[in-house]
Amino acid sequence: MSNQDLSAYSGIWCVGEVRHGKLAPTIFEILTAGGQIAAALGQKLSVVLIGSGLGPWTKEVIEAGADQVYLIDHSSLEQFVDEAYAKALTDLVNQEKPRALFLPASTIGRSLAGRAAVMLKTGAAADLTDLSAASGSNGFEKGTLLATRPSYGGNILATLVNTRSRPEIYTIRPMVFPRSPKDSTRTGVVRNITVDPATWNLRTKFIAFQAESSNEIDIGSADKIVSGGRGLGKAEGFETVRSLAKALSAAVGASRAAVDSGWIPYKHQVGITGRTVRPKLYVACGVSGQVQHLAGMGQSEVIVAINKDPECPMMKLASFSIEADLYEFIPAAVKELQKHQS
Amino acid sequence: MPLNIVVCIKQTPATGSVSIDPQTGDISKEGISYAISPFDEYALEEGLRLKERFPGGATLALTMGAVRAEEILREAIARGVDGVYHLCDEAFDGSDTFATSYILSQGIRKIEEERKIKIDLVICAKQTNDGDTGQVGPGLAAWLDWPNTAYVKKVEQVTDTLLRVHRMMEDGTDILEIQRPALISVVKEINEPRLPSLKGKMAAKKAVIPRWGASDIKADPALIGLKGSLVEIAKRQSPPKRAGGLKIGGATIEEKAKIFVDKLRELKLL
Amino acid sequence: MLMTFDYGFTDDQKEIIKLAREIAEKKIKPVRAHYDETEEFPWEVIEDIRKADLFGVYLPVEYGGFGGANTEMCLVSEELSKACGGISLAVTACGLCAIPILLFGNEAQRQRWLPDLGSGKRLGAFNITEPDAGSDATATKSTARREGDYYVLNGLKNFCTNGEAAEIYIVFATVNPVRGPRGITAFVVEKGTPGFTFGKKETKMGIRASSTYELIFENCKIPASNRLGSEGYGLFVAQATFDFSRPGVGSQALGIAQGALDETIKYIRNRKQFGQTVISFQAIQHMMADCAMKIEAGRALLYSVNRTMDKIQKEAYARAKESGKLVYEEMRALNPGRVTKYSAMVKAFCSDVAMQVTTDCVQMCGGIGYMRDFPVEKYMRDAKITQIYEGTNQVQRNEIAMMMIKEYASQMVQKELLKV
């Protein structure tokens, strides 16, 4: 498949996610990951933004490390449409020939990476949790990108390499890399890319966005999560879970059992058929810790389990386990937290 | 309005049954059990529901995989699909998402030719439980040069020319209209999968399942299997085991709560 | 998945087991506590069972069934009951409605009602009980007055399983109170018939997902073609139905017992007391072993009796198709001795086992076993009814003894005994 001249490809691109008119903060995490690679390879670090009215963000991303910013700014690109964004991005790639593209492993990032990769006839890997450039000492040619990602529900860590096609495309799991520091003295080049989507053969039309009415934190981007499981016993148990989440400024997660019981909507589900999270703090309340659930949160930094059953898998896995009735413990903990805050 | 639908499904190891063989560094064959990838159940269910909502079309299931993958196609028949196709060839072994999506696209073309129909909709799951990539759906759409939407949580309407779908976003719901033929990847929220029926199971037992190899689907040898793959797995390892942690004791609930909060403070989590 | 002893089941029967087990695990277990708590009718689960084609496994294929017989019905009932004996009852209660139609219905009647019962499109019910006629069905007071091509029903029936949810009801009323038991006649009444309404909904100790209602008949006019069998044959209809349905109760009872034991063992394997798991105590191990032995003895009895009953059922049906006679007539010709005794043994034995096993399960679990948020106590409450309905276990023993007395009194047996 590789009849490409791989050496013609240079530069690290971080593709930012502009979702419903806002730049997602994941770009700053990706700038950290991409920045390391750009430094190791001695290549230029660029940010690509696709959307409408992007100007205000150029300064931010330059200050966060971008040498160059590509703006594909067009009123008809205001909302994410797979075909349109893929077309915009791949046209630019074909013209500029970067070495690697990094995107957030979000709905937009993962959708776009999958489609763009095939359009570019290149390889993609999803949801990286680690990334480095080979030093040349461990069997990989110097400069080879080593991309690590969990698979089989986190049971296996696989290290992937793409030595056959360019650009390499990777999506990066949110909350894994720290945000790149801001340096207001930095400067960079802004390149406005002119596109004419009217001439593209687009078959998808964006109709509307319905914002989630609640002001809840999304579990995918939360650095703290408080989760409830079957042990809550009833739907009202989530009020207790929410009280702790509020006191910790955490998002609310749930096990499949809780979601299937209709206690809380699916978007809160953590686990194999739900979402994979890796927060700094994961508090599992009445979650026994079925493998399917552990697959979705086992890589959290600190895990706290609150359960009546000291023998359940979650209690054995947790960094801190608290054997208690959660209906007694949580109110006490909330009180204690309030004390701490005041 | 009727739709001819292909649902792409995959046989994967059941989560929890997978580990690394320390000798080979490969996935251990021991204790592994295979089933339909859990996400695919929702894709299959949506294919069946769309057929029930807009009768007159056919809902078909397609898989690429080893001989044993035939089991999940029988499962699909038991649940009510109208036909199944098995892409099975040693030449497909080792395919990454790039090669896999190519092979599936050729399979879909072959189904159209074989059944003398046009496929209107391909449904994939948002991801599998083994690779967890979520790239095959959008990649397949690119090979077919069809429009696609991922993370679909509802198919609101289907007309002769388009589908109106709801996409689950981190901050709400996008509504999109997408022209037929199209590809959607669906999330769990879209439905509640059915179980097979007894009559379906009997039909599944008797069914003769077409098995197509690389030449049957006119696959370009340069684009399939290890040779056609661009991303290779250099190394597999088990994630570091988490050591069990500290039990928070305390005579009273208040004491436990205090220790808990102190710990969080120590770790700068407050 | 627990291995179960294979009583020579066919591949098709094994498929039924697998499918019913999947429904029990995925569709019933998650909601059983809800229905137990609310006493709502489990329509969602009914829909799942319907879609899985499990309603008519025991009916001939001509009526949309799976061509099985008692064994198939019991396999479904046993597996579903492992998760919830109340929800499983909705299915077997339909069987209690379909069996008399199959046995005593003419071809037109079979065509009219069996396909819907077999597909689960319409649910069925069977009601013989009245406030003053429980175990003693001969005391039936409801009346059916003949008026030309119609019967006019009046009276009150109670404790009707699937009441209100069902659309097809088998009810018993007397056409001539003076004739006592010989006046009792079976009828099919459809929901919505003017003069047929529902009274009180019962609240129960167990099987709370099952609906139990009073049926009220006030000048309810039904066509004469809704009569099942001849006038005055009602008690035959009832008894012949019970002969085939009582093993169904047995299978429900064994499912309940096994379900309780499975939950119990899951718990005591992990529960630690005195520094060791509860399952490691010999006192507990003996209780476990007794439970398992009793259940297996019940299954051995159930499925061996079923095998003979299946043969009679299928053969009689095949002959009736040829001869145009009622299935029941062919059955009598094939097997004049009837199966009442064995059917009663199955029902009484298995339901006694269920009561003992579920009680012991609560005991093995200790305090948690008694709690409503742990699934074991529900099995104990559900088990109780199996010793009561379709004839209390005392009535079963009466019938067994009655048959024995008759047998021993027969000249042939007398001669045999004298030889010894």
Image (tube, grey):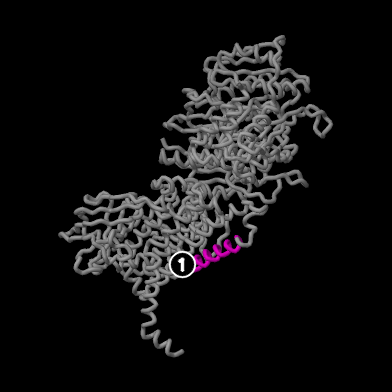
Compared across the picture, whether C63 is left or right of B136 comes to left
**Residue C86 colored in magenta in the image:** no
Q: Judge by depth and name the residue closer to the eye, A215 or B160.
A: A215
The spot of residue C174 in percent (x, y) is 23, 63
The spot of residue C113 in percent (x, y) is 31, 56
Q: Judge by depth and name the residue closer to the eye, A2 or B247.
A: B247
Q: Quadrant of the C terminus of chain B?
A: top right
Q: Which residue is mark 1?
A: C349
The spot of residue A70 in percent (x, y) is 64, 15
- Would you place residue C107 above or below residue A218 in this image? below
Whether residue B56 is visible here, answered yes or no, is yes
- Mark 1, residues whose alpha carbon is within 10 Å: few (<14), some, or many (≥20)? many
Compared across the picture, whether C161 is left or right of A28 comes to left
Pick out the residue farthest to the front.
B251
- Would you place residue B93 above or below residue A145 in this image? below
Question: Mark 1, chain letter?
Answer: C
The spot of residue C401 in percent (x, y) is 39, 75
Element at label 1? helix
Amino acid marked by disc 1: Phe
**Residue C288 colored in magenta in the image:** yes
Q: Quadrant of residue B239?
A: top right
Q: Judge by depth and name the residue closer to the eye, C340 or C253.
A: C253
Question: Which residues lie in the magenta part?
Answer: C284-303
Q: Quadrant of the N terminus of chain B?
A: top left
Q: Quadrant of residue A251?
A: top right
Give the prevailing secondary structure in the magenta stretch. helix
- Would you place residue A228 above or below residue A87 in this image? below
- Would you place residue A71 above or below residue A334 in this image? above
Q: Residue at x 64, y 54 (%)?
A: C277
Pick out the residue farthest to the bottom.
C419
